[in-house]
Structures are given as structure tokens and as C-alpha cells.
Amino acid sequence: MVMVQINKHLAKIIKKPISDNLVFATRIAMALMLSSASVQAATSLEFTQQDWQAVCDNTRTCRLAGYQAEGSSEQPVSILLVRRAGVNTSVEGKVKFGGAKESSAKALMQLGNRHRISLFIDDKDLGEIKPFSSGDADLTAPQVTALLGALAKSSKIELVLRNTRWQVSDKGATAAMTHVDAVQGRVGTTSALIKSDSATKPNDSVLPAATAPALNLVLPSNKTTNQSTKFVMRASNLATMLKQTLNDTSSCPNIADGTSWQMTRLSSTKLLAQHNCWTAVYNSGAGAWVINDRKPYNPQLVTTNATEYKSGKISAIQKGRSLGDCISKTDWIWTGKRFVKSHESTTGLCRMVEVGGAWQLPTYVSDVNIVRP
């Protein structure tokens, strides 16, 4: 894996304590440049350092999310920076205040819809952010430019409303920004988020945006070629057959617990078999298999982490912790022959910003077209 190769370089280079973000970013850049071929071949990378996270998807669009310092949950806040791949792409910025719990911060966030909130960097007022919409607010272009410069070094970043200040940590930002530069092929160019005095590569050498795969979601049909044909198999026999598809039986310890199976017709010859696989403190997962409705059954495992199936789409939605302020999600869609992954994302770090997660940070996206039978 690319991340494994990067980590080997990091282990060799980063050996001494880090005194500031800029030094750490320089070391990160050295490690990433050593493995640049591997990084540029990657299409889906996540990177987390202290209070910042970089998440890139298969089109090479990258998203940077920063939060208040870890352990400080009284004034939850997050900033999102989005940059698409390719030459001359700008960076867009948003801010969101914590509403994961009832607090004065939540009340002030609602007040912020009527009274504009200002961005301060190192105690300098950079003006009001744009009005809130759907829970977050856009930063202005000059604010984004100033913020990128501030994150490249040690800075105090605050959102201010009257006497209330939400502080966004700068810890880990330069490392995350350098990671984005590596994924998008910007290291050593003047368009890099973390610029170098020795930047010599032209901007036209950066990697272009990749095209999201086009997928057809074929809506399942309840019609069969032979209406008198029904799938009949003992639950124990079905469990024994499908257990053979598991590389690790611990991924579905409940497969043979004797409880009922859910069978759903996908086409005239294919069925979806579902069964509870595991239950944890605040998550659970079901197994999902595609099988033929008669011999040879040819079972194909889709996932053992499913939480929902509806109209040709299987979803696996899992909480990072019981509060539900950080979530991961994967979707698979029925193409008429098999299920294929259509979406994968995280909502960012668990920092009390919002129940359901602060942001949508996809690692895999696709262009889905619905096809009716």
C-alpha cells in the first residue's frame, strides 16, 4: 500500500522531537518526495496529524479539516478547505461551529445567523465570514488566502462573535497540507499549499483531475422467468455454504446462530442473502451475499458490515464512537450482475462538532445513473 511505503520513509526521517509545524512539514515533504511515484499513483488517501486531517478521493479532490485542540470540547469548531486537482484551482473554505451538545456555543452559533462572525489570525481582524447556510458558513477568498499562509506556520486562529472566541488549532495543519500537495503532484511547484524557496517545477506538471467512474444502478425486479420457482434451503445449509466465502470467520461470528435469513430477489436469477454478522456496543453489521437462485449457487460476498439495503443499494454506516459525531460510510450498488462500490467517506475527526459528523470527506466517489428494469 502507498501509506505503508510513506510510513517507512517517515520512520527513517522523523526521528527527533518536532519543535514547530514548519520543521515537521519540511520533514514530511522530504518523506513524500522520496516516495512521490507511489503517492502520485494513489487515488484514495487519508492522513491525520494532531488536529488536522487530509482526505482525498479518487478524482484527486482533497479536503482538509481542522478542529479545536484535542481535549478542548467547550467551544467545538471546524474549518474545511477544499481543493480540486489540476492547474489553477483555487481553495474554498467553510467553517462550522459545534452543535453536538447543548451549550452556550450552540446558542451563539444560532445567533451567528443574524450577527456575523469574524475571522481573527494572530489577533488581526480579517473581516466577517459569509452568512450561515445549512449549518456552515463560507469564508471569503481573502480570508482563505490569509488562512493558508497562517497554517504554514505557527499561528493563532480564532472565530469571534462579541466576547466569544472559537479557536482552531494549527497543530498538524502543515503536515496535512503537504500531504495534499503530494497527492495532487504539487510538491516543488508554486501552486503548492506549502511553498518552498527552491520550487522549480512548473504548475503545468501538477496532476490533472481524474474522472469519477460512471456506474449504472439497476433497480431490482421482482419478476422471475419462472414464477413457480422458489428458493428453498435450510438455514444451516445456507450458513455452511456462505461461510466458505469468508476469509476470516471472525468477521461474521453470528452466521450460524440459527436466526432467520432475509432473501431479496435482485433479478430473474439472482438473490441477495442477508444475515446479522456481529453486534458491538454501538455498531452492528450484517452479511450480504449475492447467490444464484438455483444450482450452482456461486455465492459472492459483498460485505459483513452492512447496515441497510434499499432499492439496489447496500450501505455500511458505522460510528466512530457512541455519540455519533464521527461516522464512516460505504455504499455498494447493484449493476445487474453484481454489487460494486459506489461511495466511501468519513465525516472527519470525533471532535463534538455535530451529531452525524461535521463534514462529508469522500475517499471514493462515482457518477451513478439509475436504470429501471
Image (cartoon, rainbow, N blue to C red):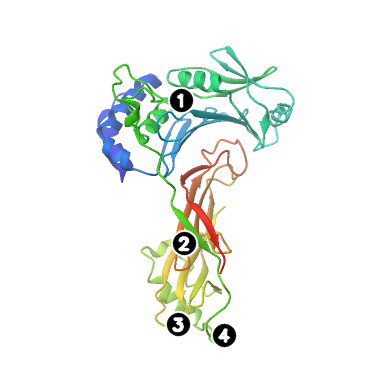
Check residue 187 in the rendering and tell me which mark sits there, or answer none.
none
* Occupied quadrant, residue 221: bottom right
- SS label for mark 1: loop
Check disc 1 and give the amino acid type.
Lys
Q: Which residue is mark 4?
A: 227
The percent coordinates of residue 179 (x first, y second) are 38, 32
Report how far apart the C-alphas of labels 4 and 1 lie in the structure: 63 Å
Q: Are marks 3 and 4 in contact (CB under 8 Å)?
A: no
Check disc 4 and give the amino acid type.
Gln
Q: Earlier in the sequence, mark 1 or mark 2?
A: 1
Residue ID at (44%, 60%) = 340
Residue ID at (52%, 46%) = 320
Q: Earlier in the sequence, mark 3 or mark 4?
A: 4
Q: Which class describes the residues within 10 Å of circle 4: few (<14), some (14-19), or many (20+)?
A: few
Nearer to us of marks 2 and 4 is 4
Q: Earlier in the sequence, mark 3 or mark 2?
A: 3
Q: Which residue is mark 2?
A: 304
Q: Earlier in the sequence, mark 4 or mark 1?
A: 1
